[in-house]
Amino acid sequence: MSSETPPDRLSVDPASPFHDADILKRGIGIRFKGVEKDNVEEYCVSEGWVRLTVGKTVTRTGAPMTMKLQGAVEPYFKN
């Protein structure tokens, strides 16, 4: 992976094995089906899906409620 290519899969949840604080601190933007999304909790480019938060709803454990959508995912570095 080069420093200019975002990872194939990334999660904002610190408990996830796909969490990377350094990359998240750098700033990641996500285009999903050509539309800019700012509520992405996790994405996977190779499998073609994003997990988006659903409003302000939370689970019993306090984690945000999410919904998984299939489609073209384009991550990029904001800076």
Image (spheres, rainbow, N blue to C red):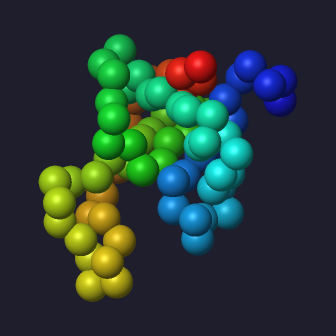
Name the residue at the bottom extreme. Answer: 60
Rendered residue at 67%/40% (across/down): 23
Image quarter hosting the N terminus:
top right
- Looking at the image, residue 68 sits to the left or right of residue 2; the answer is left
Name the residue at the right extreme. Answer: 2
| Above/below status of 40 relative to 31 | below
| Above/below status of 18 relative to 29 | below
* Residue 19: x %, y % from top left: 63, 56
Rendered residue at 38%/43% (across/down): 40
- Looking at the image, residue 2 sits to the left or right of residue 39; the answer is right
- Looking at the image, residue 63 sits to the left or right of residue 48; the answer is left
Residue 73 visible from this viewpoint:
no
Q: Nearer the viewer, residue 26 or 4?
A: 26
Q: Nearer the viewer, residue 68 or 78?
A: 78
| Above/below status of 38 relative to 77 | below
Q: How many marks?
A: 0
Rendered residue at 55%/33% (across/down): 27
Rendered residue at 34%/83% (across/down): 61
Q: Nearer the viewer, residue 18 or 27?
A: 27
Image quarter hosting the C terminus:
top right
| Above/below status of 13 relative to 44 | below
Residue 1 visible from this viewpoint:
yes
* Residue 64: x %, y % from top left: 31, 65
* Residue 21: x %, y % from top left: 65, 52
* Residue 32: x %, y % from top left: 38, 26
